[in-house]
Amino acid sequence: MEVIKIFMLFLVFVTSTLIGKFLSKRYVYRLEELEEVQNSLNIFKSKIKFTYEPIPEIFEEISQNTSKNIGLIFLKAKQKMNEETANIAWEEALDEVVKENKTNLKNEDINILKNLSKLLGQTDVDGQVSQIEITQNFLETQIKEARSRKSKK
């Protein structure tokens, strides 16, 4: 009887530990994805500002040079730009990636990224660059919050 109790306690301990590890990894992955989005937006801003490449080409390049989850957002947006405007394609790509549960970003993070679509492809270079910078500022707040949650949990 004692052996069964000890075994059950051990099983509860191992299960709890594994669940805790799994949940803590989500905080790490979210932080990594937010930082990856921040880097991708830096590339996007630089390309718009200095190379004047079309947005679909920039998204294609970013999708090839970023991690799987974040690159998928840019790739889907690029593919949707064949039929939709840039702002609609960006929002639909974000919605699809969230629906498919392919990212660790929270709804707040996704809403910040959706704000980017307001001026995407609709204004001049300076307007788009300023919208990217606004999005980056909001993302910086999310990154700080994600870092603190990661260290706490």
Image: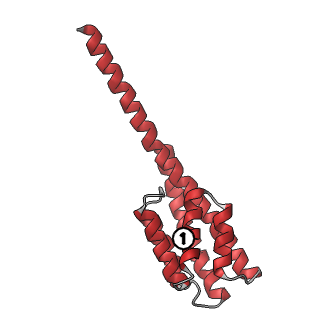
Percent across and percent down for residue 130 are: 62, 81
Residue drawn 53% across the image and 86% down it: 85
Which quarter shows the C terminus?
top left
Q: Secondary structure at mark 1?
A: helix
Give the camera-side residue of 28 and 142. Answer: 28
Q: Which residue is mark 1?
A: 76
Q: Is residue 41 left or right of residue 109?
A: right
Residue 125 falls in image quadrant: bottom right
Residue at point 70%, 80% (across, down): 48
Q: Nearer the viewer, residue 29 or 146?
A: 29
Q: Residue furthest top?
A: 2
Please say if 47 is above or below 32. below
Q: How many marks?
A: 1
Report the residue that reaches farthest toward the left. Answer: 1
138 on left or right of 46: left
| Quadrant location, the N terminus | top left
| x and y percentages locating residue 18 in the rendered image | 42, 33
Query: Residue 149 versus residue 81: which sits nearer the camera?
Result: 81
Q: Is residue 96 above or below residue 55?
A: above
* Residue drawn where x is 61% and y is 83% of the image: 128
Q: Is residue 51 above or below residue 153?
A: below
Q: Is residue 136 visible?
A: yes
Identify the image quadrant of residue 21. top left
* Residue 153 shows up from this direction: no
As drawn, 70 above or below 53: above
Residue 97 on image: x %, y %? 47, 64
Apparent side of residue 12 relative to residue 38 in the rendered image (left or right): left
Q: Residue at x 72, y 76 (%)?
A: 47
**Residue 13: which quarter of the image?**
top left
- Three-letter code, disc 1: Lys
How packed mark 1 is, by other alpha carbons closer than 10 Å (few <14, some 14-19, many 20 or more), is many
Residue 42 place in picture, x, y as percent: 67, 69
